[in-house]
Image (cartoon, rainbow, N blue to C red):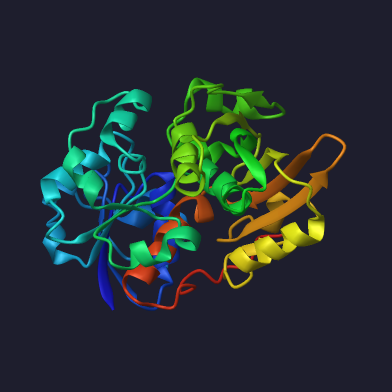
Amino acid sequence: MIKVAIVGATGYTGLELLKLLAQHEHVEIAAVTSNSKAGAHVTSIYPHFKGILDITLSSTDELNPAEFDVVFLGLPHGISMDFVKKAGLESTRIIDLSGDFRLSSPDLYNTWYPREHVFPEAYTQAVYGLPELFREDIRDAVLVANPGCYPTSAILPLVPLIKEDIIDAGHIFVDAKSGVTGAGAHAKPNTHYPVVNDNFSAYGIATHRHTPEMQDVALRYSGVEPRIQFTPHLLPVSRGILATCYGILTTDIEEEHIQNIYENYYGNEPFVRLVDAPPELNHIRGSNFCDIFFKLDKRTGHIITVSCIDNMVKGAAGQAVQNMNIMFGFEETSGLHQTPLYP
Protein backbone atom coordinates (compact mmCIF):
# COMPACT_ATOMS: atom_id res chain seq x y z
CA MET A 1 0.00 0.00 0.00
CA ILE A 2 1.09 3.55 -0.69
CA LYS A 3 -0.17 6.66 1.07
CA VAL A 4 -1.57 9.32 -1.23
CA ALA A 5 -2.81 12.86 -0.77
CA ILE A 6 -5.13 14.73 -3.11
CA VAL A 7 -4.71 18.48 -3.02
CA GLY A 8 -7.69 20.39 -4.35
CA ALA A 9 -10.07 17.46 -4.25
CA THR A 10 -13.44 19.16 -4.69
CA GLY A 11 -13.08 20.14 -8.34
CA TYR A 12 -14.22 17.69 -11.00
CA THR A 13 -10.73 16.28 -11.48
CA GLY A 14 -10.25 15.80 -7.75
CA LEU A 15 -13.62 14.08 -7.44
CA GLU A 16 -12.75 11.69 -10.26
CA LEU A 17 -9.44 10.92 -8.54
CA LEU A 18 -11.26 10.17 -5.29
CA LYS A 19 -13.58 7.77 -7.08
CA LEU A 20 -10.75 5.92 -8.83
CA LEU A 21 -8.36 5.78 -5.88
CA ALA A 22 -11.06 4.67 -3.45
CA GLN A 23 -11.22 1.33 -5.29
CA HIS A 24 -7.48 0.96 -5.90
CA GLU A 25 -6.12 -2.11 -4.13
CA HIS A 26 -2.68 -0.58 -3.50
CA VAL A 27 -3.74 2.87 -2.27
CA GLU A 28 -4.59 4.42 1.07
CA ILE A 29 -6.16 7.85 0.66
CA ALA A 30 -4.45 9.47 3.64
CA ALA A 31 -5.35 13.14 3.07
CA VAL A 32 -7.76 15.16 0.98
CA THR A 33 -7.57 18.93 0.97
CA SER A 34 -9.91 21.75 0.06
CA ASN A 35 -9.22 25.21 1.42
CA SER A 36 -12.79 26.35 0.79
CA LYS A 37 -14.37 23.31 2.48
CA ALA A 38 -11.76 22.34 5.11
CA GLY A 39 -13.28 20.60 8.11
CA ALA A 40 -16.23 19.18 6.21
CA HIS A 41 -16.77 15.46 5.76
CA VAL A 42 -16.57 14.49 2.11
CA THR A 43 -20.07 13.01 2.14
CA SER A 44 -21.59 16.25 3.43
CA ILE A 45 -20.55 17.86 0.14
CA TYR A 46 -20.78 14.85 -2.17
CA PRO A 47 -23.35 12.36 -0.83
CA HIS A 48 -22.58 9.86 -3.60
CA PHE A 49 -19.47 8.86 -1.61
CA LYS A 50 -21.58 7.66 1.36
CA GLY A 51 -20.44 4.18 2.37
CA ILE A 52 -17.43 4.47 0.06
CA LEU A 53 -15.22 7.18 1.58
CA ASP A 54 -14.89 8.16 5.24
CA ILE A 55 -12.61 11.16 5.25
CA THR A 56 -12.67 14.77 6.41
CA LEU A 57 -11.28 17.49 4.20
CA SER A 58 -8.31 19.43 5.52
CA SER A 59 -6.56 22.66 4.58
CA THR A 60 -3.71 22.48 2.10
CA ASP A 61 -1.58 24.51 4.52
CA GLU A 62 -1.80 21.65 7.04
CA LEU A 63 -0.37 19.13 4.59
CA ASN A 64 3.17 17.81 5.05
CA PRO A 65 4.11 16.33 1.65
CA ALA A 66 6.88 14.22 3.19
CA GLU A 67 4.24 12.06 4.91
CA PHE A 68 2.97 10.70 1.59
CA ASP A 69 4.36 8.51 -1.16
CA VAL A 70 2.69 10.60 -3.84
CA VAL A 71 0.69 13.82 -3.93
CA PHE A 72 -1.86 14.51 -6.65
CA LEU A 73 -2.43 18.16 -7.44
CA GLY A 74 -5.93 19.03 -8.61
CA LEU A 75 -5.22 22.74 -8.38
CA PRO A 76 -5.88 25.39 -11.05
CA HIS A 77 -3.26 26.47 -13.57
CA GLY A 78 -0.95 29.01 -11.96
CA ILE A 79 -1.51 27.64 -8.44
CA SER A 80 0.07 24.19 -8.66
CA MET A 81 3.54 25.65 -9.19
CA ASP A 82 3.29 27.47 -5.85
CA PHE A 83 2.66 24.16 -4.09
CA VAL A 84 5.50 22.39 -5.92
CA LYS A 85 7.94 25.20 -5.14
CA LYS A 86 7.02 25.21 -1.46
CA ALA A 87 7.05 21.42 -1.13
CA GLY A 88 10.24 20.92 -3.13
CA LEU A 89 10.95 17.82 -5.17
CA GLU A 90 12.94 15.97 -2.52
CA SER A 91 10.12 15.20 -0.07
CA THR A 92 7.64 13.25 -2.22
CA ARG A 93 6.62 12.41 -5.77
CA ILE A 94 4.07 14.70 -7.38
CA ILE A 95 1.55 14.20 -10.16
CA ASP A 96 0.31 17.60 -11.28
CA LEU A 97 -2.93 17.73 -13.24
CA SER A 98 -2.61 21.43 -14.08
CA GLY A 99 -0.73 22.90 -17.03
CA ASP A 100 2.07 24.40 -14.94
CA PHE A 101 4.79 21.94 -15.99
CA ARG A 102 3.50 20.52 -19.29
CA LEU A 103 5.28 22.78 -21.73
CA SER A 104 8.90 22.55 -22.87
CA SER A 105 10.07 25.74 -21.17
CA PRO A 106 8.94 28.37 -18.68
CA ASP A 107 9.29 30.98 -21.43
CA LEU A 108 6.70 29.17 -23.52
CA TYR A 109 4.48 28.90 -20.44
CA ASN A 110 4.74 32.65 -19.88
CA THR A 111 3.63 33.23 -23.47
CA TRP A 112 0.44 31.17 -23.26
CA TYR A 113 -0.60 31.38 -19.59
CA PRO A 114 -1.67 34.54 -17.72
CA ARG A 115 0.80 34.24 -14.84
CA GLU A 116 4.59 34.21 -14.99
CA HIS A 117 6.07 30.91 -13.86
CA VAL A 118 7.50 31.04 -10.31
CA PHE A 119 9.41 27.73 -10.31
CA PRO A 120 11.18 27.39 -13.68
CA GLU A 121 13.93 25.25 -12.12
CA ALA A 122 11.48 22.34 -11.86
CA TYR A 123 11.24 22.08 -15.64
CA THR A 124 14.44 20.05 -15.73
CA GLN A 125 12.75 17.35 -13.63
CA ALA A 126 9.21 17.44 -14.98
CA VAL A 127 8.16 14.51 -17.20
CA TYR A 128 5.23 14.70 -19.59
CA GLY A 129 2.84 12.02 -18.37
CA LEU A 130 1.45 10.40 -21.51
CA PRO A 131 2.15 6.73 -20.73
CA GLU A 132 1.81 5.34 -24.24
CA LEU A 133 4.72 7.54 -25.39
CA PHE A 134 6.81 8.28 -22.29
CA ARG A 135 6.37 5.27 -20.04
CA GLU A 136 10.08 4.80 -19.29
CA ASP A 137 10.55 8.47 -18.34
CA ILE A 138 7.49 8.33 -16.07
CA ARG A 139 8.76 5.29 -14.20
CA ASP A 140 11.47 7.16 -12.30
CA ALA A 141 9.98 10.66 -12.33
CA VAL A 142 9.57 12.80 -9.22
CA LEU A 143 7.30 15.32 -10.99
CA VAL A 144 4.83 14.18 -13.62
CA ALA A 145 2.93 16.78 -15.63
CA ASN A 146 -0.34 15.07 -16.45
CA PRO A 147 -1.32 15.94 -20.05
CA GLY A 148 -4.25 18.13 -20.95
CA CYS A 149 -7.45 16.48 -22.10
CA TYR A 150 -7.51 17.94 -25.60
CA PRO A 151 -3.81 17.17 -26.22
CA THR A 152 -4.32 13.56 -25.11
CA SER A 153 -7.14 13.12 -27.61
CA ALA A 154 -5.07 14.59 -30.47
CA ILE A 155 -1.51 13.46 -29.71
CA LEU A 156 -2.31 9.75 -29.53
CA PRO A 157 -3.69 9.48 -33.10
CA LEU A 158 -1.25 11.99 -34.59
CA VAL A 159 2.15 10.88 -33.25
CA PRO A 160 2.43 7.62 -35.26
CA LEU A 161 1.60 9.55 -38.45
CA ILE A 162 4.14 12.27 -37.64
CA LYS A 163 6.93 9.94 -36.59
CA GLU A 164 6.53 7.72 -39.65
CA ASP A 165 6.49 10.82 -41.89
CA ILE A 166 3.05 10.02 -43.27
CA ILE A 167 1.69 13.54 -42.76
CA ASP A 168 3.12 17.04 -43.03
CA ALA A 169 3.74 18.14 -39.43
CA GLY A 170 3.73 21.74 -40.56
CA HIS A 171 0.06 21.68 -41.51
CA ILE A 172 -2.15 19.83 -39.02
CA PHE A 173 -5.71 20.73 -38.09
CA VAL A 174 -7.36 19.60 -34.85
CA ASP A 175 -11.09 20.15 -34.47
CA ALA A 176 -12.18 18.93 -31.02
CA LYS A 177 -15.38 19.00 -28.97
CA SER A 178 -15.59 18.64 -25.20
CA GLY A 179 -18.23 18.18 -22.54
CA VAL A 180 -18.84 20.96 -20.02
CA THR A 181 -16.85 19.33 -17.19
CA GLY A 182 -13.73 20.37 -19.07
CA ALA A 183 -14.47 23.95 -18.01
CA GLY A 184 -14.23 23.08 -14.30
CA ALA A 185 -16.67 22.89 -11.41
CA HIS A 186 -17.19 26.63 -10.96
CA ALA A 187 -19.96 28.04 -13.13
CA LYS A 188 -19.08 30.63 -15.74
CA PRO A 189 -21.38 32.66 -17.98
CA ASN A 190 -20.63 30.47 -21.00
CA THR A 191 -21.08 27.20 -19.05
CA HIS A 192 -24.39 28.13 -17.40
CA TYR A 193 -27.04 25.48 -18.14
CA PRO A 194 -29.42 27.69 -20.18
CA VAL A 195 -26.48 28.75 -22.37
CA VAL A 196 -24.99 25.31 -22.94
CA ASN A 197 -28.17 23.27 -23.21
CA ASP A 198 -29.40 22.74 -26.78
CA ASN A 199 -26.41 24.73 -28.02
CA PHE A 200 -22.97 24.25 -29.61
CA SER A 201 -20.14 26.77 -29.73
CA ALA A 202 -16.47 27.28 -30.55
CA TYR A 203 -14.09 29.09 -28.21
CA GLY A 204 -10.40 29.89 -27.72
CA ILE A 205 -9.95 30.15 -31.48
CA ALA A 206 -6.20 30.40 -32.32
CA THR A 207 -5.40 31.17 -28.65
CA HIS A 208 -6.09 28.01 -26.66
CA ARG A 209 -3.22 27.06 -24.31
CA HIS A 210 -3.40 23.40 -25.34
CA THR A 211 -2.04 24.33 -28.77
CA PRO A 212 1.63 24.66 -27.68
CA GLU A 213 1.29 21.45 -25.66
CA MET A 214 0.31 19.54 -28.79
CA GLN A 215 3.10 21.18 -30.79
CA ASP A 216 5.69 20.44 -28.09
CA VAL A 217 5.02 16.72 -28.25
CA ALA A 218 4.80 16.71 -32.04
CA LEU A 219 8.21 18.41 -32.20
CA ARG A 220 9.82 15.44 -30.44
CA TYR A 221 8.86 13.23 -33.37
CA SER A 222 9.08 15.60 -36.31
CA GLY A 223 11.97 16.85 -38.39
CA VAL A 224 10.24 20.19 -38.91
CA GLU A 225 8.66 22.78 -36.64
CA PRO A 226 5.08 21.56 -36.17
CA ARG A 227 2.18 23.89 -36.83
CA ILE A 228 -1.14 22.79 -35.40
CA GLN A 229 -4.33 24.75 -35.95
CA PHE A 230 -6.51 23.85 -32.97
CA THR A 231 -10.13 24.85 -32.49
CA PRO A 232 -12.02 23.62 -29.41
CA HIS A 233 -15.81 23.48 -29.12
CA LEU A 234 -18.22 23.10 -26.21
CA LEU A 235 -20.76 20.29 -26.40
CA PRO A 236 -23.99 20.29 -24.36
CA VAL A 237 -22.94 17.07 -22.55
CA SER A 238 -21.34 16.44 -19.17
CA ARG A 239 -18.18 14.62 -20.23
CA GLY A 240 -16.21 13.31 -23.15
CA ILE A 241 -14.05 14.61 -26.02
CA LEU A 242 -14.32 13.81 -29.70
CA ALA A 243 -11.33 15.04 -31.71
CA THR A 244 -11.20 15.06 -35.50
CA CYS A 245 -7.68 15.64 -36.84
CA TYR A 246 -6.71 16.37 -40.44
CA GLY A 247 -3.25 15.73 -41.89
CA ILE A 248 -1.85 16.27 -45.37
CA LEU A 249 -0.32 13.07 -46.75
CA THR A 250 3.35 13.21 -47.69
CA THR A 251 3.35 9.91 -49.54
CA ASP A 252 1.12 7.57 -51.51
CA ILE A 253 0.04 5.01 -48.95
CA GLU A 254 -2.67 2.42 -48.42
CA GLU A 255 -4.96 2.08 -45.42
CA GLU A 256 -3.58 -1.37 -44.67
CA HIS A 257 -0.10 0.10 -44.17
CA ILE A 258 -1.42 2.77 -41.82
CA GLN A 259 -3.38 0.16 -39.88
CA ASN A 260 -0.16 -1.83 -39.42
CA ILE A 261 1.60 1.28 -38.13
CA TYR A 262 -1.11 1.92 -35.55
CA GLU A 263 -1.00 -1.74 -34.52
CA ASN A 264 2.77 -1.50 -34.02
CA TYR A 265 2.38 1.56 -31.81
CA TYR A 266 -0.72 0.71 -29.84
CA GLY A 267 -1.61 -2.93 -30.42
CA ASN A 268 -0.40 -3.91 -26.93
CA GLU A 269 -1.56 -0.79 -25.12
CA PRO A 270 -4.26 -1.54 -22.56
CA PHE A 271 -6.09 1.77 -22.95
CA VAL A 272 -5.85 2.50 -26.68
CA ARG A 273 -8.43 0.77 -28.84
CA LEU A 274 -8.13 0.83 -32.63
CA VAL A 275 -11.68 0.72 -33.95
CA ASP A 276 -13.08 0.10 -37.42
CA ALA A 277 -15.89 2.69 -37.27
CA PRO A 278 -15.91 6.29 -36.04
CA PRO A 279 -16.01 6.19 -32.22
CA GLU A 280 -18.65 7.92 -30.12
CA LEU A 281 -18.63 9.46 -26.66
CA ASN A 282 -20.89 6.72 -25.33
CA HIS A 283 -18.25 4.16 -26.30
CA ILE A 284 -15.69 5.53 -23.81
CA ARG A 285 -17.68 7.55 -21.23
CA GLY A 286 -16.53 6.79 -17.68
CA SER A 287 -13.52 4.75 -18.82
CA ASN A 288 -9.79 5.25 -19.36
CA PHE A 289 -9.93 4.21 -23.02
CA CYS A 290 -8.92 6.22 -26.06
CA ASP A 291 -10.65 4.93 -29.20
CA ILE A 292 -8.94 5.77 -32.51
CA PHE A 293 -10.31 5.54 -36.06
CA PHE A 294 -8.76 6.76 -39.31
CA LYS A 295 -9.81 7.22 -42.92
CA LEU A 296 -7.76 8.03 -46.02
CA ASP A 297 -9.18 10.55 -48.48
CA LYS A 298 -7.05 10.18 -51.60
CA ARG A 299 -9.26 12.65 -53.45
CA THR A 300 -7.97 15.50 -51.26
CA GLY A 301 -4.67 13.94 -50.17
CA HIS A 302 -5.64 13.92 -46.50
CA ILE A 303 -5.92 11.44 -43.66
CA ILE A 304 -8.67 12.03 -41.12
CA THR A 305 -8.49 10.59 -37.63
CA VAL A 306 -11.33 10.51 -35.10
CA SER A 307 -10.59 9.81 -31.47
CA CYS A 308 -12.68 9.77 -28.31
CA ILE A 309 -11.71 9.98 -24.64
CA ASP A 310 -13.46 10.78 -21.41
CA ASN A 311 -11.97 14.15 -20.51
CA MET A 312 -12.27 13.40 -16.79
CA VAL A 313 -10.67 9.94 -16.98
CA LYS A 314 -8.12 9.38 -19.76
CA GLY A 315 -7.99 13.16 -20.12
CA ALA A 316 -7.28 13.77 -16.43
CA ALA A 317 -7.75 11.55 -13.35
CA GLY A 318 -7.55 8.15 -15.04
CA GLN A 319 -4.32 9.05 -16.78
CA ALA A 320 -2.96 10.33 -13.45
CA VAL A 321 -3.72 6.98 -11.83
CA GLN A 322 -2.14 5.22 -14.81
CA ASN A 323 0.98 7.31 -14.24
CA MET A 324 0.98 6.48 -10.53
CA ASN A 325 0.77 2.77 -11.34
CA ILE A 326 3.83 3.07 -13.58
CA MET A 327 5.78 5.11 -11.00
CA PHE A 328 5.23 2.55 -8.23
CA GLY A 329 5.52 -0.62 -10.28
CA PHE A 330 1.86 -1.65 -10.03
CA GLU A 331 -0.03 -3.32 -12.84
CA GLU A 332 -0.73 -0.40 -15.17
CA THR A 333 -4.44 -1.16 -15.31
CA SER A 334 -4.90 -1.30 -11.50
CA GLY A 335 -7.94 0.69 -10.43
CA LEU A 336 -8.83 1.42 -14.05
CA HIS A 337 -10.97 -1.53 -15.11
CA GLN A 338 -14.15 0.52 -15.54
CA THR A 339 -16.36 -0.56 -18.43
CA PRO A 340 -17.64 2.43 -20.41
CA LEU A 341 -21.09 3.66 -19.38
CA TYR A 342 -23.51 2.73 -22.14
CA PRO A 343 -26.09 4.00 -22.76
Q: Is residue 331 left or right of residue 114?
A: right
For image coordinates 40% across by 68% down, the residue present is 22
Q: Nearer the viewer, residue 222 or 69?
A: 222
Q: Position of residue 257 (x, y in %)?
A: 76, 60
Picture quarter containing residue 137?
bottom left
Q: Position of residue 234 (x, y in %)?
A: 61, 31
237 vs 337: above or below = above
80 vs 137: above or below = above
Q: Position of residue 155 (x, y in %)?
A: 55, 47
173 vs 159: above or below = above
Q: Nearer the viewer, residue 261 or 207?
A: 261
For image coordinates 73% across by 57% down, the residue present is 258
Q: Is residue 172 left or right of residue 45?
A: right
Q: Is residue 213 visible?
A: yes
Callout count: 0
Instruction: Point out the residue furthest to the right here.
Output: 299
Q: Nearer the viewer, residue 236 or 318?
A: 318
For image coordinates 64% across by 70% down, the residue present is 267
218 vs 125: above or below = above
Q: Is residue 180 left or right of residue 263?
A: left
Q: Is residue 279 visible?
A: no
Check the picture and name the quadrant holding the N terminus.
Answer: bottom left
Picture quarter containing residue 193?
top right
Check the picture and name the quadrant holding the C terminus.
Answer: bottom right
Q: Position of residue 333 (x, y in %)?
A: 49, 73
For image coordinates 63% across by 67% down, the residue present is 264
